Amino acid sequence: MLETHTLDALREALRTLDRQFAMLPEIQSPEPDRMRAVLAEVAARLGDNYPYFHPLYAGQMLKPPHPVARAAYALATWINPNNHALDGGRASTAMEREAVGQMAQMFGWGPHLGHLTGGGTMANLEALWVAGRLYPGKKIVASAQSHYTHQRVTGVLQIPFAKVPADARGRMDPNALETMLAAGDIGCVVATLGTTATGAVDPLPEILALRERYEFRVHIDAAYGGYFILADNLAPETRAAFDCVSGADSIVIDPHKHGLQPYGCGCVIFRDPAIGTLYKHDSPATYFSSQELHLGEISLECSRPGASAVALWATMRMLPLVPGGEFAQGLAASRRAALALHARLAHDARFRAPFVPQLDIVVWASSEPGSTERIFQQAARRNLHLAMARLPGSWFDSQREEIVCLRSVLMKPEHEQWIERIWEILDEAADVAAQATAR
């Protein structure tokens, strides 16, 4: 079940790497028998997990890294580079710059400033920190359906924050935004391209148009949805949002989501390279090995794993970020899977599926009060693992302020081939749940 073919390729790559250090005296390796015993115990412990790698795991944003990413990451750990100063990771620093440059190019940017981070939270913190430095004392706003990261990190940064109401599809309401902008106290608007709850894409064209009348920065939180800029099957309004991302001031994307990377690998990119002056600091123990800019000089984080950069570079080498390529086709397959599941839910009276997915996340609820959680439990007993979320009741024609609904993140391209099996299990789980509710 678990992919193991890369182990042979990894052994071969290790021999190649080892030959490059053949001039050094040998050092003693740990005792293999003791390691085998510990690793056997680790493997037994790791079995206490949901099968995140399998298509029947259709719950949270969890998917296995690409085999080449897994192998490249492991290979790099034999060196364990630190992408802070160049002398801590010369090769991996160059690979990080190349990988981030390709992502910037994907968004339509040439010159830029960017680097990898530990994840979307740290990446968003850096982008909002920059916004706060450029617009001191002004408010940062994001959709009511945006990730909780924004409210949390603005609290850490001691920057005022407010939520903009969302429409019935979970998108920022541009009319409500304009009303708030009229007060003149907003310095940055966060547009989310792919909310974590529903995959909603905020109306970026309208937000950028408002910037023509009101002065503020536009930061895009595309931690989840950013790679969908390459997909060829987005709805017209979603496509319009992705087509104008180059007009933003900063973008966050998480390669450890759709980018097929191990956790944690986020990325923040700024359109204006001059933003680097805001990071300027002195470190008396580093930055001596080269006159070239060190990544630690343009990052709030200090030590950062060079292995993440190596894994990302290797993946993009194998699966380039180009429209119509193998990587882009995988994104399109995930969206087709979401559309197929939504179509079945929308035509079944047992469910309420309020809107067509913009990306690859489907949300729905049982038409029978009290059955949603039972469906979740019954599906899990049949090895179909879903997720739950609390969303506005009005989206589901409910009088309640919030309801608990079911949610599926169909982010594995293989999900498209498994929709029939997923539906069979969901159909059976819903019937059993309805019988239990009736009793």
Image (spheres, rainbow, N blue to C red):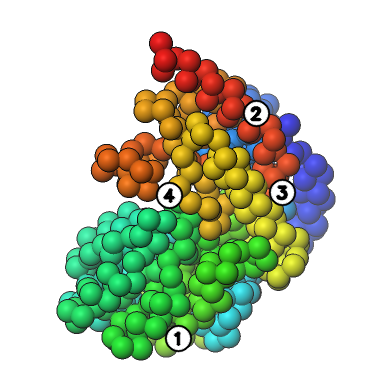
Query: Marks 4/2: CA distance?
Result: 24 Å
Query: Marks 1/3: CA distance?
Result: 34 Å
Circle 3 residue = 67
Circle 1 residue = 272
The percent coordinates of residue 402 (x first, y second) are: 29, 42
Circle 4 residue = 197
| Image quadrant assignment for residue 8 | top right
Query: Marks 4/1: CA distance?
Result: 31 Å
Q: Nearer the viewer, mark 1 or mark 2?
A: 2
Indicate the amino acid at tag 3. Answer: Pro
Circle 2 residue = 424
Q: Nearer the viewer, mark 4 or mark 1?
A: 4
The answer to whether any part of residue 313 appears in the image is: no
Q: Is residue 147 left or right of residue 353?
A: left
Indicate the amino acid at tag 1. Answer: Asp
State the residue at coordinates (60%, 40%). Answer: 344
If you read the primary sequence from the N terminus, does the residue marked by circle 1 or circle 2 appear first? Answer: 1
If you read the primary sequence from the N terminus, does the residue marked by circle 1 or circle 3 appear first? Answer: 3
